[in-house]
Image: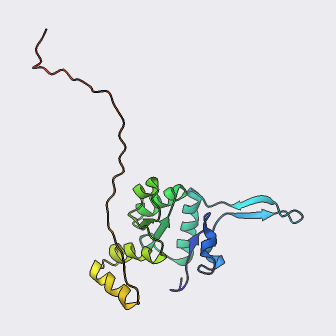
Amino acid sequence: MMNSNERLMMKNDRHSRQEGIVPPENIFGTEFDYENSTGEISNIRRAPAGYGKVAVLEELEAERQITPDHTVYVGDGSSDLYVMHHVNGRAGHTIAVSETKAIGRIAQRTVLSASALALLMPILEDILKWGADRIREWFAAQGLGLQGWDKIHTDWLTFHKAPIRIVASENAASV
């Protein structure tokens, strides 16, 4: 079972940001074999992108004895779509951390912030059912003032010129 200080993540192209935060053994990403003489990649051992992330997630749930309804998955791009569908379908919780439309449509919540602490918002609100006042008080008790918290629903619309369609009605005068 994971202790409270242990973190897991699936490595993506931004994995270097996690150095010093997440222990290397808890980062799950593409694994390669290398040629000893040249250092070139000789084989892909594992590539958990797309549906491969689902397989890794299921392994972690089994290994750590985490039930699917206690899974929170955070994603930022199209390689997270399969696993977000999977987590949503098993009563878990999904959070998007980018403005990518495809992922925002699937995720239960989207959080945009420069601070990783922002990921606590949907967990505190949706899972622990805390209200805004309790959340603000909790952050204040940790010595953190919540400076801005904008909750919005966004509709992205695009229009184009279309020919006007004239529909004849039954009451139109005949010529």
Residue furthest toward the right?
37
Q: Is residue 94 left or right of residue 17?
A: left
Query: How many numbered circles are shown?
Result: 0
Residue furthest toward the top?
175
**Which is nearer the eye, 139 or 83?**
139
- Residue 145: % across, % down: 37, 84
Q: How is the image coloured?
A: rainbow
Task: Report which quarter residue 129 is drawn in.
Answer: bottom left
**Which is nearer the eye, 89 or 116?**
116
**Is 80 above or below relative to 156?**
below
**Which is nearer the eye, 112 or 42?**
112
- Quadrant containing the C terminus is top left
**Is 59 above or below relative to 165?**
below
**Which is nearer the eye, 92 or 165?**
165
Q: Is residue 84 left or right of residue 8?
A: left
Query: Which residue is painted at 55% across and 83% down in the image?
Result: 6
- Residue 66: % across, % down: 49, 75
For the question of whether residue 53 can be seen, the reply is yes
Query: Which residue is painted at 60% across and 75% down in the image?
Result: 18
- Residue 71: % across, % down: 46, 71
- Residue 68: % across, % down: 45, 69
For the question of whether residue 131 can be seen, the reply is no
Task: Report which quarter residue 154 is drawn in.
Answer: bottom left
**Is 16 above or below relative to 164?**
below
